[in-house]
Amino acid sequence: MTKFIGPYFSYPYIKKRETYPDFKLFLELMNLFSRIPHGITIRGALYMWNQEIGKDWKESGDNLNLPFNKRTGNPLEITDIFVKNAKACDTKLIIDNYSFKYHKNTIKRFKEEFGYKNVIIDNRSEMSDPKNRINLALKNERAIEGYMHDKFFLFSELTGIGQYVILQMTANINYTQYHQYNNFLVLYDNKELFDMYTKHWDNLKKRVMQKKAWAFVDMTNRNIRFNQANLHRNFQGDSIDEATKHKNGVWFFPRKTCPVEMHLKHITKTANFSTKIYIAMSFLTRGNFSKILKKLKERGCEIRVIMSEEFQNRNTIIRLKKYKIPYCIIKNNYLNENNYEKDENGNLVNIIGAFKDNWRGRMHHKFILIKHQNQKTVWTGSYNFTHPGLHLNDETMLKLIDPTLYNKFKKHFDRLWKNPKEIKKLKSLLI
């Protein structure tokens, strides 16, 4: 049986188009890091890590009883607590080169504290740079390489919790994430699941050190080609059949087929009006996924989709409207009418402004809730439903069948869906 703590959610406060940070999720991270005992084994795979909280804390108005850093005047930061406890442990981290470029101070500190060989920077690709992805989108092209987008920690033990602790996040440890909607979950005392993550981490390190990606795209024919020698079967649930069973599991990416899509295809056979599907996904661009939702809608299923306001989601929004599937867009607060062009009727018709730095107020969740035949399932992890996310990036997706966990995620989903001040149905995105 899988034991868990959480999930924890961040819910930034928005007033008069300004987004105020929510530190609750990161305070829980600080609490977890403070439980690190000496001598344990720690493994981490992170897309971004920035040690600076900056002025946001003071501006948030939170009056929290925390130890303060005398140098910065800010509360003791997550990085301070992690380093203090983890440097007495066998600590090894893999971090994407995005962090190296934009958060080099944190990387430098980690190398000094943990040793240069124990902090591994993934330099296989420059595709983690937003400017490169934007340029591809403008030219309607796809990435030829992926990047390390994982967001998890493995602790052999945490004081007061247990052994074989897995921390799976949607958030990066970065000051921008205080302004975004995120979640994380703690799993423990499940050695089998812990070993799956560990094997994935070891394999990831090996490929990063060898500078080998899993796949590449033939831009001429737009076909995905895989090096079969690199596609390993090292974790429970690798076969598609496992995704459809009444069983918890974890799937690592890149891979040929999405296990969540296989799960939804499977339940299409028996879906009816009692089947519920709730999706909160920052980026949802796979046309195949929209077609699966269409079939489920035709079977009478209740479907709701929440996405972030992103240029890449525009075609999905058009499909959802065509299929009459209810959706909501959480509007990034850095985007406003000045970023759009208006047609002769005054409607906003161009969202090219979404290519700006639109992190403030972004819906960064990646979870899907499925209620079918009295089974309540949560899928969550780092994976967005995109072409790079499936075929190119290093990602993780957990499948957990648990009614209590499902209900907690559903309560948060309802909060996102029902708040009219923070969720907009943007017809302007239908270009």
Image (cartoon, helix red, strand yellow):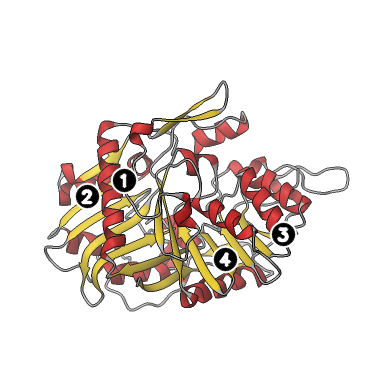
- What's the distance in space between the residues labelled 2 and 4, CA to CA? 40 Å
Q: According to the image, label 2 marks what residue? A: 110
Q: According to the image, label 4 marks what residue? A: 370
Q: Nearer the viewer, mark 1 or mark 4?
A: 4
Going by the numbered disc 2, the residue's amino acid type is Phe
| In the foreground, 111 or 249 | 249
Q: Residues within 10 Å of mark 3 (few under 14, many from 20)?
A: many
- What's the distance in space between the residues labelled 2 and 1, CA to CA? 11 Å
Which label's residue is closer to the chain start, 1 or 4?
1
Badge 4 marks a residue whose secondary structure is strand
- What's the distance in space between the residues labelled 3 and 4, CA to CA? 13 Å
Which label's residue is closer to the chain start, 2 or 3?
2
Percent from the top left, x then y, of residue 41?
A: 17, 59
Instruction: Kindly indicate whether the residue at mark 1 contacts the one at mark 2 (C-beta within 8 angstroms).
Output: yes
Residue at 50%, 44% (x, y): give it: 257
Q: According to the image, label 1 marks what residue? A: 95
Q: Residues within 10 Å of mark 4 (few under 14, many from 20)?
A: many
Going by the numbered disc 1, the residue's amino acid type is Ile
Badge 3 marks a residue whose secondary structure is helix
| Quadrant holding the C terminus | top right
Percent from the top left, x then y, of residue 332?
A: 60, 55
Which label's residue is closer to the chain start, 2 or 1?
1
Percent from the top left, x then y, of residue 303?
A: 67, 63
